[in-house]
């Protein structure tokens, strides 16, 4: 039986083969309008917040501490780290990197009374040493500013490259490609698609182009074959897939996690219930 070859592909919750997520930085006034739009379209976003910059009004119109809390404590979107003082982590000592993250995490977790394990690098700045520090501090994922232009899942969640920024000239073409194609269309199965867009909401005000976001969501939102999730939900789900325990012949798999996991194998979709062992049909 060991010569039987089966390739198993991750599928998102409910067996969906595509996911869409957003990531917006800095905690600025325009996030209020953005969240209103996201709610209308039922899409999810991760907002990356500093914790030591509140009085700096005028710097891209950052929100006051009170406004920030009023908005993000109730909006149903994810909050994540962005550094205490928005420092270039590659331009400070390791001790300061630790302080940037610990102070940021302590503030957000105690203020919002929730676990905050995600992050976006200020200025996209990172390197191997910083990734190691983040791992030691329990950060599960961190977004860069490097565009992939494609729908691949990250190889390393601490260097999570997004598909593109919302100002990307190809944004509408990429969005069209995302909805018009599917890994299920291929004769041979393919990995699931993730479309990941990032930016700053003040850019929509500065450039008077909020239509960029509504045009994007007109294309990608409210589709049955897409999972709309925060960055953290996607990271947790993909990590849960990685924790599956396989039998030596690949015929059985145990799901030790708290979440049901969907996989596609030999063109068949399987739900692997939390805490259960599944035997595959040969
Ligand atoms: Zn920033």
Image: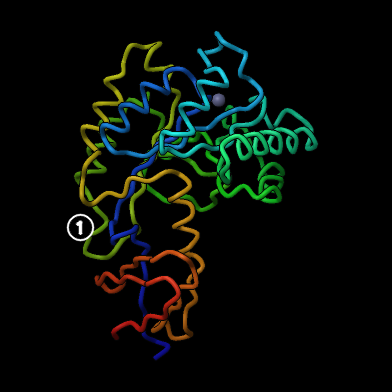
Q: Image point 29% across, 56% down: which residue? A: 17
On-image quarter of the N terminus: bottom left
Q: Quadrant of residue 230?
A: top left
Give the secondary structure at mark 1: helix
Q: Quadrant of residue 104?
A: top right
Which of 219 and 115 lies nearest the eye of the viewer? 115
Few, some or many residues within 10 Å of mark 1 (<14, 14–19, 20+): few
Q: Return the residue found at the far top.
A: 58
Residue 26 left/right relative to 125:
left
Tell me: residue 5, above or below residue 231.
below
Q: Quadrant of residue 7?
A: bottom left
Report x, y in % for residue 43.
32, 38
Report x, y in % for residue 132.
70, 48
Q: Image point 47% across, 39% down: which residue? A: 78
- Residue, disc 1: 185
Tell me: residue 234, above or below residue 29.
below
Report x, y in % for residue 129.
72, 44
Which of 112 and 233 lies nearest the eye of the viewer? 112
């Amino acid at each position: 039986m060991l010569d039987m070859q089966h390739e198993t592909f991750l599928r998102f919750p409910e067996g969906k083969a595509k996911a869409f997520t957003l990531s917006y930085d800095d905690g600025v006034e325009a996030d209020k309008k953005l969240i209103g739009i996201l709610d209308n379209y039922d899409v999810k976003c991760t907002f990356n917040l500093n914790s030591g910059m509140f009085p700096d009004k005028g710097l891209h119109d950052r929100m006051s501490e009170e406004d920030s809390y009023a908005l993000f404590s109730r909006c149903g979107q994810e909050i994540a780290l962005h550094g205490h003082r928005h420092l270039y982590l590659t331009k400070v000592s390791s001790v300061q990197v630790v302080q940037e993250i610990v102070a940021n995490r302590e503030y957000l977790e105690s203020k919002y009374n929730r676990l905050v394990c995600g992050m976006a690098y200020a200025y996209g700045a990172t390197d191997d040493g910083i990734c190691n520090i983040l791992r030691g501090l329990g950060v599960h994922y961190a977004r860069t500013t490097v565009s992939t232009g494609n729908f691949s899942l990250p190889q390393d969640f601490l260097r999570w490259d997004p598909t593109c920024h919302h100002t990307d000239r190809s944004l509408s073409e990429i969005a069209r490609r995302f909805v018009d194609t599917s890994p299920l269309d291929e004769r041979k199965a393919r990995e699931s698609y993730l479309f990941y867009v990032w930016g700053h909401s003040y850019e929509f005000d500065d450039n008077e182009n909020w239509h960029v976001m509504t045009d994007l969501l007109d294309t990608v939102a409210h589709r049955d074959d897409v999972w709309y999730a925060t960055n953290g939900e996607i990271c947790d789900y993909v990590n849960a897939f990685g924790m599956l325990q396989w039998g030596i012949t690949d015929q059985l798999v145990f799901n030790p996690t708290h979440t049901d996991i969907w996989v596609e194998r030999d063109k068949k979709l399987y739900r692997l219930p939390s805490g259960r062992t599944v035997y595959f049909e040969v």
